[in-house]
Amino acid sequence: MLENLHLRFFRNYESLDWQLGNGFTVLSGPNGAGKSNLLEGIFYLGAGYPYRQAQDEALVHWGADFFVIRGSVLQNGLKYDLEIAYQLGTKRKITKINGKRDLPGACTACLPVVIFSPADLLLIQGAPSLRRRFLDLVVTQSRPQHAADLHDYSNILTQRNNLLRQGVFQRAEILSWDEQLVAVGARIISRRLSVFKTLMDLSRVVFASLSRNGELDGAYISQMIPQYSLEEDEDFCRQAFKDALERRRSLDERLHITTTGPHRDDLRFFLQGHEAQLYCSQGEQRLIALSLKIAQNRLLSSVQSSDALLLLDDVFSELDTVHREKVLKELSRSRQVIATTTSFLEEGDSATGQLTPEITLYQAKGAEWL
C-alpha cells in the first residue's frame, strides 16, 4: 500500500504531504479543488505517465520549472521510496527507487495502480497509442522486465529512424538496427499477446456480469502477423517481425520512418462481433472499458501476492445505480481504494480530516458507499 505522498509543484499543488491509510478513502470537494490531480499524481508515481492526455510540461505548477512526486510504499513487508522528477527546461524525467536511478515505468513493480475515470472511454474511442500504453502498463505490472525492453526498443527505433532520415547508408547499417529491433520487439509482442489473451478471458467474464448485451471479444492487430496466425511464441514473433521489416524496407526508406513493429500495433474490441469503436453506444463502450480495468485488477491480484492500489476518479457519476453497485462491490474488496466525489457522503461515513481547505477526507464503508 501507499503510505505517504509528497507533491511539489505538481498541477495546482505548490506543496502537499499526505499520510495515507488503508481501506476505502474518499476525497470530497467541489470541482476544481484538485481531487483528480491528487489521483493523477499517485497514478503517475506508479505508472510513470499521466492517465489524462497531458504532456509532462502541462503538469508543472504555474510559474515553476519542475515537479516532484514522492511516495513510500509497503509491499510484502518491504518498503520502497519512489520518486519521479521532471525538469521543464531540459524536458528531462528522472525516476528513482530507494534513491537509485531507474528506468521510466520501473516503479510499477513496486506500486501497481489501476485507475477508473471518465477518461476510460479513450480506451475504446481514442488513438491506438493509448491502447498500446494501457496494455504495456498491464504487461509491465505483471512482468516487470517489460519496462526495460520498452526502453531499449524506443532507443533502437530512434536510431533506426535517424539512419532512415539520412537517406544514404550502407545495407549493413540498416540490417544491424533491424537485428536489434527484432530481438527486443519480439519479446514485447510475445508478452503483449500472452497478457492480452488472459486480460480478454477475464474481461469477458466481468462484462457478462455487468451487462446482458452480448459477448465481449478483443483482437490484437499487427501489420507483422496475419490475424488468423497470431501466436505468443517468441521465435514466431521474431521471424514475423524480421520478414515484415524486409517486406517494408523500401517503404521505410521512402518515408524515412519505421512503418511496422510493436510501436504501430493496436487493440480492437468487439460486442457480438461488431467493432465497439464504430457500432457500440457510449454506455456500452463505458462498460467495456470498465470490464477491462476490473480484469486488469483481477489479473494483477492473481500474479502478485498483493492487490493493486485502486483509484476511482468520479467514475460512479457516469453509471446508473445497478452498475454502480456491481462495480463498487467488486472493487471494495481491495486493501487500499481512493475515490473522489463532489457530493457529501451519507450519514455513517465519518470525516477523518481536511487534506486541503477544499478537500475533506472520509473513511467510507466500501460497497455501501454510493
Image (cartoon, rainbow, N blue to C red):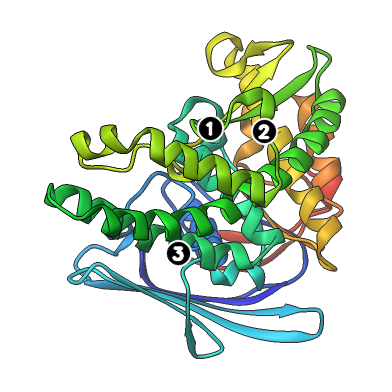
Q: Could you tell me how far apart the alpha carbons at marks 1 and 3 are, in whole angstroms? A: 20 Å
Q: Could you tell me how far apart the alpha carbons at marks 1 and 2 are, in whole angstroms? A: 9 Å
Please give the name of the residue rendered at 44% of the width and 57% of the height, measured from the top-left corner: 179
Earlier residue among tags 1 and 3: 3
Q: Which mark is residue 151?
A: 3
Q: Give the amino acid at mark 2.
A: Leu
- What is the x, y in percent for residue 142? 71, 60
Nearest the viewer among 325 and 229 is: 229
- Residue 88 appears left or right of 141: left
Q: Secondary structure at mark 3?
A: helix
Q: Could you tell me how far apart the alpha carbons at marks 2 and 3 are, in whole angstroms? A: 24 Å
Image quadrant where residue 20 sits:
bottom right
Q: How many marks?
A: 3
Q: Give the amino acid at mark 3.
A: His
Determine which residue is flagged by label 2. Answer: 230
Earlier residue among tags 2 and 3: 3
**Viewer-nearest of discs 2 and 3:** 2
Q: Secondary structure at mark 2?
A: loop
Q: Quadrant of the C terminus?
A: top right
Nearest the viewer among 35 and 199 is: 199
Residue 187, above or below 221: below
* Tag 2 and tag 3, C-beta contact below 8 Å: no
Determine which residue is flagged by label 1. Answer: 222
